[in-house]
Amino acid sequence: MDELTNPDKILLTKPNVTKGEIAAYYETVQSLILPYLKDCPLALVRCPNGLDSCFFQKNIDTPSRSSRHIHTQSILDPEGKPVTFLYIDSAHGLMELCQLATLEIHRWGTRRQHPLHPNDIVFDIDPAPDVPWRQTVDGALELKAVLENLNLISFINLTGGKGLHIHVPIAPQYTWQEIKDFSHTTALYLEERSPGRYISTMTKSQRGGKIFVDYLRNGFGATAIAPYSTRARQGGRIALPISWNELPNLNPDEFTIPWAIHSILRRRDPWKDYFAVQQRIEILDRNGVKNP
């Protein structure tokens, strides 16, 4: 891509955010976001004409004839079936995602070099609509304590919505099924310990007043919003990595594209140690999953 076309096109409202402003945001944060995107299988939410035109783009052969820096790779899934995913490996690729009116970048918890072995576990702390923010924060902190009891370091990401994502970087030596089983067991443990506060199933009729501890983002081909991605939501919200110390005192509504363009590089990187952490999961290394 040599030049961004239609930079004045409004893609988000309340306030208005243009395609050019989204590209400016990604130029601002490219040094922060690229380490989380480079060589990761991606899925995109593209909205060429704003929020009324969004679609999800994942397993495709060619993202666009004009895309020179968005690549594809074909592999066999755990059942031996062919799967094709897209990935980028440069700032040029990131800007081409902007050209395609990408409002959300989702990623698998792995890299293309070892696609059958995840290197990131994601727990989605997903509150029901009637759950207050303080309860959501407390749920994230409780899960953090459970993980610490398993000698696992975790990192937290504001999703740009009501929920929170807790990331656990791991060494890429386990299968997707092992990681899914581990995360499911952890979610069940929270539910069994506090059934009035947590639920481990998606059944909406049973979720009132509770937090869904979503472990399903840890299956092969499942995705989670990338740190620093924009969101396809009114107001120009972003997914923002934060520190655990910041969490209790933050208002997630404050972190938008206009705020980020002017302020994000002034922050200390709360995830600066993320890529240095390659954890083993002791209960998996002991050949089985048991309660935390």
Image (cartoon, rainbow, N blue to C red):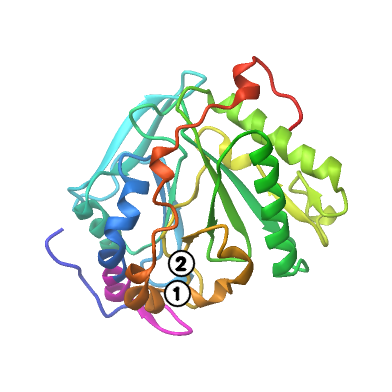
Quarter containing the N terminus:
bottom left
Q: Quadrant of residue 247?
A: bottom right
Q: Position of residue 168 (x, y in %)?
A: 54, 41
Q: Residue at the location (76% across, 30% down)?
A: 291
Q: Is residue 81 above or below residue 63?
A: above
Residue at the limit of the structure toward the top, as seen here: 287
Nearer to me, 176 or 96: 176
Q: Amino acid at mark 2?
A: Ile
**Residue 238: image tag:** 2
Q: Does residue 7 appear to the left or right of 131 in the view shown?
A: left
Give the total number of marks visible in the rendering: 2
Comes first in the chain, label 2 or label 1: 2
Q: Is residue 144 above or below residue 116?
A: below
Residue at the limit of the structure toward the right, as seen here: 196
Nearer to me, 129 or 154: 154
Q: Does residue 8 appear to the left or right of 172 in the view shown?
A: left
**Residue 11: image tag:** none
Q: Amino acid at mark 1?
A: Thr
Q: Which residues are magenta?
A: 12-24
Q: Of helix, strand and loop, which one carries label 2?
A: loop
> Circle 1 is placed at which residue position?
256
Q: CA distance from mark 2 to mark 1?
A: 6 Å
Residues at marks 2 and 1 touching, judged by CB atoms closer than 8 Å = yes
Q: Quadrant of residue 269?
A: bottom left
Magenta span contains residue 34:
no
Q: Position of residue 209 (x, y in %)?
A: 82, 62
Q: Residue at the location (30% across, 51% down)?
A: 34
Q: Position of residue 68 (x, y in %)?
A: 17, 48
Q: Does residue 110 appear to the left or right of 73 in the view shown?
A: right
Magenta span contains residue 18:
yes
